[in-house]
Image (tube, rainbow, N blue to C red):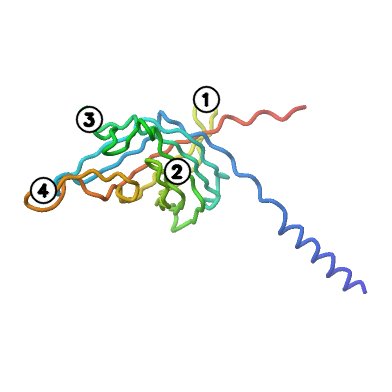
Amino acid sequence: MRRVLRFATLAVLAVLAASAPAAAADVWQIDGAHSAVQFKVTHLMIATVRGEFGKLTGTIEYDGTNPASIKADVTIDVSTVNTREPKRDEHLKSADFFDVAKHPTATFKSKQAVAGTAGTVKLVGDLTLRGVTKEVTLEITGPTQVITDPRGNRKVGATATAKINRQDFGVAWNKTLDAGGVVVSDEVVLTIDIEAGRKPDAPAAK
């Protein structure tokens, strides 16, 4: 009888342990002054043109140890696009490309993080650009070790890359070259450098 009761107790404890919520991951604020979103495309089939978006905000959930705990919610201000050529930037903001008057921001909301080889993570989520949402996988190098800055804030960093087809998001403008090929490639390579931080934990109440 004791053996039966012991088995029943262990079974109940196992069920309770399995149903207990996992410890909540810390929420880290993206440091816009030390983070950036860059992109590159092929121009005239022969050269690479690079640009960036100058403002991004959002949060990263991360428990500080397990990369599979990572969740991201990022907003990019598309109107801050910069390719170091004002006329080109104005064209990119127009309805031919990003149409920032109607769609001033792009967002990425993660759905799943899968730890890869040491120091890498695949982060799957929904990218919304120009009002169109598609699933995208970010290849992440990191996250780094958590460090403490001179002000006592905890900091962590990571770099993410992805390749997308701009046509999938309705960014369709192009011109055909007389000798064949197009002015702008459909493939866009994204690189996202993130630094995120948390303020020092408040002291426990006495």
- The numbered mark, 3 or 4, whose residue comes first in the sequence reads 3
Q: Is residue 89 left or right of residue 201?
A: left
- The numbered mark, 2 or 4, whose residue comes first in the sequence reads 2
Distance between the alpha carbons at the discs numbered 3 and 4: 24 Å
Q: In this view, does 23 lie to the left or right of 163?
A: right
Query: Dot 2, how many residues are within 10 Å of its Cα: few (below 14), some (14-19), or many (20+)?
Result: many
- Point out the image quarter for the N terminus: bottom right
Q: Which amino acid does the dot numbered 1 rest on?
A: Arg
- Between tags 2 and 4, which lies in front? 4
Q: Which amino acid does the dot numbered 3 rest on?
A: Arg
Residue at 79 percent of width and 66 percent of height: 11
- Between tags 2 and 1, which lies in front? 2
Residue 84's tag is 3
Q: Which amino acid does the dot numbered 4 rest on?
A: Leu
The residue that mark 2 highlights is 108
- The numbered mark, 1 or 4, whose residue comes first in the sequence reads 1
- Point out the image quarter for the C terminus: top right
The residue that mark 4 highlights is 177
Distance between the alpha carbons at the discs numbered 2 and 1: 30 Å
Q: Where is residue 55 in the image (x, y as percent from the top left)?
A: 39, 30
Q: Which amino acid does the dot numbered 2 rest on?
A: Phe
Quick check: 6 above or below 94? below
Q: Is residue 94 left or right of residue 21?
A: left
Quick check: 59 above or below 2? above
Q: Residue furthest top?
A: 151
Q: Do the residues labelled 2 and 1 touch (CB within 8 Å)?
A: no
- The numbered mark, 3 or 2, whose residue comes first in the sequence reads 3
Quick check: 1 above or below 13? below
Q: Position of residue 89 (x, y in %)?
A: 25, 31
Residue at 64 percent of width and 45 percent of height: 24
Task: Please tell me in which quadrant of the rendered image residue 76 appears.
Answer: top left
